[in-house]
Image: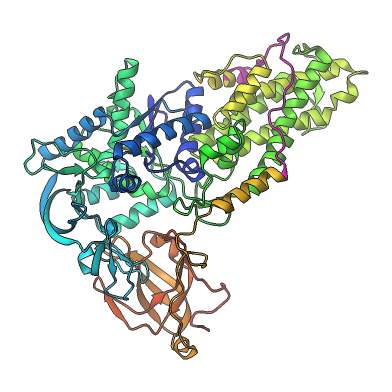
Amino acid sequence: MREFKRYMVTSALPYANGPLHIGHLAGAYLSADIYVRFQRLMGKDILYICGSDEHGAAITIKAKKEGKTPQDIVDQYHKLFKTTFDRIGISFDMYHRTSAKIHHETSQEFFRSLYDKGEFDVKTSEQYYDEEASQFLADRYIIGTCPNCGHEEAYGDQCENCGSSLSPTELINPRSTLTGATPVLKETTHWYLKLDQYENWLKEWISTGFADGKQLHEPGDWKNHVVGQCKSWLEGGLQPRSMTRDLTWGVDVPQEIEGAEGKKLYVWMDAPIGYISATKQWALDNGKEWEPYWKDEDTALIHFIGKDNIVFHCIIFPAILKAEGSFILPENVPANQFMNLEGRKISTSKNWAVWVHEYLDDFPDRQDELRYCMIKNMPEQKDSEFTWKGFQDANNNELVNNFANFFNRVTVLTNKYYDGFIPEFDEDIDFIGPDSQEDIAFHESELLRLFDDIQDLNQHIRNFDFRSALRTLMEISSKGNQILQFNEPWKKQKEMPDMVKPVMNICLQYIAAMSVVCRPFMPFTSNKMRRILNLPALKESGELDDLLFRLCEGEPIIEAGHKINKPEYLFTRIDDDVIQAQVDKLLATDQPETSDDSENGSPIKETITYEDFTKLDIRTATILSAQKVPKADKLLQLELDLGFEQRTVVSGIAQHYTPEEVVGKKVSLLANLAPRKIRGVMSQGMILMAEDADGGLSFISPDDQWPDGMMVS
């Protein structure tokens, strides 16, 4: 990514109806915090914005269940978010909220601007209405019997039993999830953004970086899964999307617009504008101008999100910004994938999660240990996993045995040999480096090697490759340890003290550099290192840039004669019983969603006979190609090879897999299912999938060595 005059960084607004878990940290917050702290250390003008997403039907439902007002709910979680982020060291310049007056005004200004430009179509349609709850129902708040497979718990947008994409009016015996009442159809009018008009523009912008005759971002810089998900949506064809809802809680549609009474802005018209309203509040609080961060083409706008928000940040919000006309577009959207927990998907409803505020209560002085483990396992390109055993190993084997061990040995020996003073040395006296049998000059070699390593680390951060950056930090620590170990100052101090001084001096330069370089990853540890080294606390205002200049010039980072403080341990080992207690806590609080004993919470279906089972013809197959079904967000059209023939199958997996992800997959196919036309495509069978309690799907795949067409029995 090219250099910019300033940087505008956002993290996805957390939804204010539950606490933060480690999946949130790994998805959108730690990566942004690393990037922002690094750019500050390089002296860049960078602004980091976030806030609580406080609107939407789920908040009103939670309020009703708990006998509270929606404002009570959002106040509770907004406060918890702010304290949790602060305790774990996420360094926002402004953490705001979408219930604030300035946000409502900003969102309404956006809507009014698009309305005045003619960017909306007004459409009247019949939607289900719950008369007992006195509100229209979103698709997910309607359940009924699937017209295709007879499943009695199908949602208004999809049957998760057979994968069929549905509309609420197709359900048999529909009922409201709010009250259980039978909803009625009632006419309602909404404003639809003409998203289809931006389809070609979005394709060009996402694929090439060019739009409107200008280079808006560098092609190839975006992650493959981000581009792949966007292309999958675009290939399916964009349709006008409603920007308003019939709700009682949210941002009002500007009341001067005819028909606006009782209408609220759609959450994805409202929430991302929260980035802008938060920037306005920051500017007011600090006597700054907000517009350069959102309207100057020499500003890089970067959204850090999880993969479930890709479409909204790469298609819907950019289309809104383009329609408004005066705002810049994202330079990059480095979305992370999902982090799992102990072999399972994190589930808030089942309490299968490590809640960040609870972790901080249990480990009040181990913030950086969690940050380190999260970054090491960050799901940058694919889903990753957190385990308590892995957390323990990362702490004991890497932070304690490598990073802390090196720092402690250097500070202990400095206090022992020199009463804590950085030793001066004769520059004509060389010492032996670990990579060579020849003498290595202090200034000409080790400082320059350290400079090169830090530059490599910095480039990884610029490329949003934070795992590699963290690995490079640990390699720097290892190299410092090698210098110490190779020269064995504890053996030479008595007989050759002059040979020990340059060794100790360069090791002190290493740990002084590490106190700066580790700051983006482990800010609390950086503070502790600076205190022990008796160095000024970092203000994140160009200190890394200054460090690199000194290294490049061969100048020491910490001067001879400077006195450090007494040594302290940076990290300590975590015992097995501590880890077992956390595993036990997780298992004890795991809440199944139903009372049955099946692992995924789904009740066993009624008993069938062996003869019933023998009627199923299940075959191995390979997916040859895949594409989105037009005008169906949840459906993929698959071409399968059964060895003896090829078939077309329509499967409701598009929200779980992109077409690119499934091509080449070995699958199990129910081959003798009666053909059925789905959205105009004749489907000849059904792909067998496993579904977890949260609706996540995975293929039931035979081993790769199985030829296509083999019968599964």
User: Picture quarter containing residue 654?
Assistant: bottom left
Look at the picture and state if 161 lies above or below 695. Answer: below
Residue 301 in view of the camera: yes
In the rendered image, which quarter contains the N terminus? Answer: top left
Q: Residue at x 61, y 25 (%)?
A: 526
Residue 478 image point, x, y percent: 72, 34
Q: Which residues are magenta?
A: 549-576
Count of labels shown?
Answer: 0
Main SS, magenta residues: loop
The extreme top residue here reads 561
Please state which of residues 662 and 368 is positioned toward the viewer in this rendering.
Answer: 368
Left or right side of 59 for 30: right
Q: Residue at x 48, y 50 (%)?
A: 338
The extreme left residue here reads 258
The extreme right residue here reads 495
Judge whether residue 391 is colored magenta. Answer: no
Residue 120 image point, x, y percent: 13, 45
Judge whether residue 574 is colored magenta. Answer: yes
Left or right side of 637 for 239: left
Q: Residue at x 61, y 17 (%)?
A: 550
